[in-house]
Structure formats: C-alpha cells, structure tokens
Image (cartoon, helix red, strand yellow):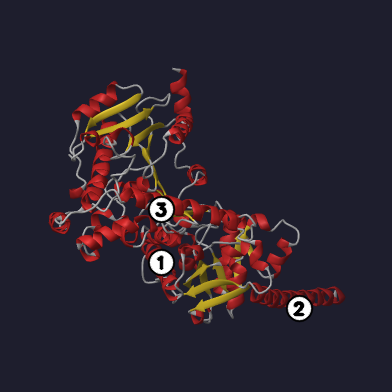
Amino acid sequence: MSGARDRDTTNVVIGSIFHSVANRAASLSMKALFGYSSRVYVVGREHANGAGGFLLASNHISHFDPLIISSVVRRKIDWMAMAEFFPVPGIGHFLRAVDAFPAERDRADRKTIRSAIERLKNGRVVGVFPEGGIRDGARSLLEGAPLRAGASTLAHIAGVAIVPCVILGSDRLYAKRSWLPFRRTPVWIAFAQPISHFPELEKSVARQRIEQELTAAFQRLYADLRQKFQLTADDLPHPPRERMRANPRNPRRPFHRATASVVDFGMCVSMNLVQSRHRLNGRSAEEMERYVVECENLTPHEYYAAPPDVDLVTAIRNASSGSITWRSPIETGFPQNNIARVDLFPSARGKTAPTVIMLHALMSATHIGYRRWAARFNDLGWNACFVHLPYHYSRVPRGHWNGELAITANLIRNAEGLRQSVIELRQLISALRENGCNEFGILGTSYGGWIGALLAMVERDLRFVALMCPIVNVEHAIWKNPGTAFMRRELRRAGIAPELVARHFHLSSPSHGMPLCDSTRVLFVSGDFDLIARPSDIAAIHEKWRGSELLRVPQGHFGYRMMRETIARLKQRGLYEANLDNRSTASAR
C-alpha cells in the first residue's frame, strides 16, 4: 500500500515537473519564433501583468494571436481554444501542455465554463476571444460587430476584472514571405485598464455594463493603435485567404503595374485632350461664387431631393423589358441630356424581385459587358437596370463624344450632372418600390462609383453598394489628378480658387460625407496601380465609413478583373443571393 502511494506521489511529481518544463519550453519557443518572424509593438503592457485572476479578452484576426499575445505578457495565460483542435495529434498535446482548454464554438459548454471559473478563482489568467472566431471587416468587433455574451458572464460569475486587448498585423503571418529571414512582420498589441465586474449591480445590469465598457475599450484601443503608429489600410485586418494569396514577388506583378500605368496614363491624356475643347469665360468665377453661395447651406438631402414621378411609376408597371425614359427633373442646356433613360433586364421573378442598378464609368466605351452581368444577375433571381448617366449613351448631345460634357472645367455643369444622376436614381428607386420591389443593389464603376457613393449618402434601404475605383476625394480629383491637368489650368486662368470649390464638397465629395445606408453593406474596391482614384483615398473613406469593406485588386483604373472579383466578393458575403426557392416557384408558374 505504501509502495503504491509512493509511486503515485512520484508520478504526480514527475508529471508536475514535465508540465512545468513543457510550459517553459513552449514559452521560450514562442518568444524565439515570433522574435525571429515579427517586430511586436506593445502599448499598455502593465495592464496585462497585474496580480490575481482576470479575464483577458482580445479580438481575433489569426491563429497566431494567442501565441503572440502570450509571448509579450509576463503572466501565463490559459487560453480557451476551439475544441476541434484538441483531437489533432501534436496540436492537442501542445495545447494541453500550455494549459489551454477546449471550448465549443457554437454553444455554451458547462464543463468549459466550470473550468474557466475555477482557474479564474484560483488567481490565474484566462484568455478568450469574444468574437467566437477569426473576424475581419464588418464582422469584427473593431468595426462595430456585436460581442458574444460569454466574456461578461464569466467575469461576473467568477468575480474578476476583464483586461481588453487589441492585436493588429498578425494576419500577415499567413503569407509565406512573412517568414523569410529579416522580414520581421510588424505586429501591434494594446492593452487597456481592467474593467470591473460591477459586483454592486444586479446580474443582468452588470453584464450589460461590462459589455458596453468592453466594446468601448476595443474601439478606443483600435483607434489609438491606428493613430499612434499611423497604420494604413493594409495594416488592418484582412481575411486569412486574402493574406495567403498575397504574393508581391509574383514575377508578373511588375508587368501588370507597368501595363496598368501605361493604360491609365493614355486615358489621362485622352481626358485632357477632350477637356481642352471646353474653356471657361470671363464670368466663370462670378458664376461659380453665386452657385456655391446658393448651395453651401443645403444638406445632401435637400440638394438631392427627388420629386415623385407618376409617369415613371406607370411606365415601369407597363414595361416587361426594354428601355424606360422620363423627363429629368434637372433641366440643362442640352435637350438630349434632359431625357433620363434606363434599360431594364427583368428576371423570371417579376417586378417584385430585388433589383441591381448598374452605373457605368466616365466615357464608358460600351454597355455590352454590363448586359452580360445583367444576365448573370437575372439567373440569380435579380432584375437589373442599366442607367444612362448624364451626357452618356442616349443622352450625348449632338457634336460631342460619349461622356465628354460630364467632367470639364465647368464645375457647375459637373456638379449639376452629379445632382441630376442622384435625383434620377432616387426617382427610379421610388418608382420601383411603388411596383413592389423592396431590395436594391448598387454596382458603380469610377464615375458611376462616385454617383453610387453620393446615393448611399441619401438612400437608407440598400442591400449592397459596390463601388469600384470610385472618385471619392473630389479635391484630389480636381487639383492633383493627372486626368484633369487641363481643367486645373482653366480654373486657375479663370481665378477659381480651391477654397471656393471646397465649399461645395459636403454635397459632391463622398469623403466629406457619411452614408445613410448601413455602412456594413458598402464594398469599396480599389486598384493597386490606379493613377486616377488613388488607393489611399479609397482606404481613407473605407476607414471613415466604419463597417464598410475594402477589396484591393491588382489592376489600374481601367480593367475587367475588378468587376469579376467584386461580384465574387459580394457572393461570398451573401449580399446578392436572392431567394432561389421563390425564384423556382416563379419560374414554374
């Protein structure tokens, strides 16, 4: 009996020593590994090294997060990890060696909760990811997505504080190049002061208060890291698959950049040649001053107010396909431009099906590509509308080229063209609603993306807003864009100052406004090599329109790859999937 007891004691001691050695070895290995691969910047480390038990709650952007966070904190962290990892040979042994414990991702497991509470009450640190998995963009708590209630529940039951943590940059480690010698991928981590479990409050009130404090802390840490380290859009969280695909060493990338630059430059030259046909007169500055004074006190809703059009409602009701025209509420000096037109591509589901509105680029060469995409949307149960924007296609005045008059040194005409576009689109949406359609998607490219962004500022109910290479920074578009060099010369010759033009930006420049629609349904798409709609401008509005998504495509301002990748991304997010059961029913009828 005594011998058996001694053997049991010996086994416990040996197990304890092995566990301690394994823990220490894992800790040193992680410090060495991430010291080699990463350059970690830490803010507020002292908050994570306090005494006693507490819950450490972090956002989650990669599988490397718990390892990196543990490597910069003096206290040992017992991480709550996904249960499916534990049966895997090697990974399961490692997780147990570092005192991680399994948690079901989609349901509350009593054993997991008891284990976490016991560890916390014993003065240990337990690490959790309140998002429930790896998240980026609109799905991330950093962009306003809701927290799961588990962290607040654990903290309140265990009677411990929560230390918020935000980590950025670790998702780059999915790219193979990040592990090359001397690369040292930057990672940024910030810890906030502990949040109380509010023992003085009633249980439900306390948990709600914890969640509010935790959400605010995450947002604050996120903003602090971006400001302190001047982080760019590429530094912020991206989907793991996107990071894995990133390969700047691709030998074709320099060729793509060179080709895109040549095409963009050629188009900029063409735009300047077209603009050179239009000069300002001696009254232009006075007229611009008068126009700005009339507009500067208007809100976007007032500027883009759309009068109802009964005839348009009737025309859509009676139309089965083909084109719809109506009198534009904005009168211009060109009769052809005063007739609004949209080409309808109905699906088998009829007029009540969701509708995608396609907005073409400036001086768009052909509508054939849009017709093909309209057919694809029809197959998915969506109706499609191809809009003839002002001074394009059927609205081109005699003696001018397609889109020539949409953007010139005549800024008043430019602004009125934008206004005309948005008001006509609002009339179209209203008329479609009157005919039973309640869901709308916007697909805009370049000039059409500019108009789509302005529409998002005044329309609330949009299923998705996909803006490809949109013109969002009008200040840059006028005064620095290579495609508007002649325009700048004319404006300076006429004495029209940037300060005067800027007084209209709250109405015409999307980067100076905010969306009325749900920003999580906005997808910005930028071209890596774009010389016209700068990627930095699109990244800036993506950050300002909190919750929106940014997709980067390796092309210039002009190219066909962007449309394909945009549609693919919308499909991944489920933003344009129609109810196929309803579609099948409609087809059967």
One can see residue 536 in this view? yes
Residue 397 image offset from top left, x and y in percent? 26, 36
Residue reaching furthest to the top: 589
Nearest to the eye among marks 1 and 2: give it: 1
Q: Give the residue pinned by disc 1.
A: 219
Residue 203 image offset from top left, x and y in percent? 40, 63
Disc number for residue 268: 3
Specify the amino acid type for callout 1.
Answer: Gln
C-alpha distance separating marks 1 and 3: 40 Å
Left or right of residue 405, residue 68 in this image: right
Residue 258 image offset from top left, x and y in percent? 55, 56
One can see residue 123 in this view? no
Nearest to the eye among marks 3 and 2: give it: 3
Secondary structure of the residue carrying tag 2 is helix
Residue plotted at (71% across, 62% down): 91
Specify the amino acid type for callout 3.
Answer: Cys
Quadrant housing residue 65: bottom right
Left or right of residue 552, residue 215 in this image: left
Q: Give the residue pinned by disc 2.
A: 17
Residue 303 image offset from top left, x and y in percent? 19, 49
Left or right of residue 159, residue 447 in this image: left
Secondary structure of the residue carrying tag 1 is helix
C-alpha distance separating marks 3 and 2: 71 Å
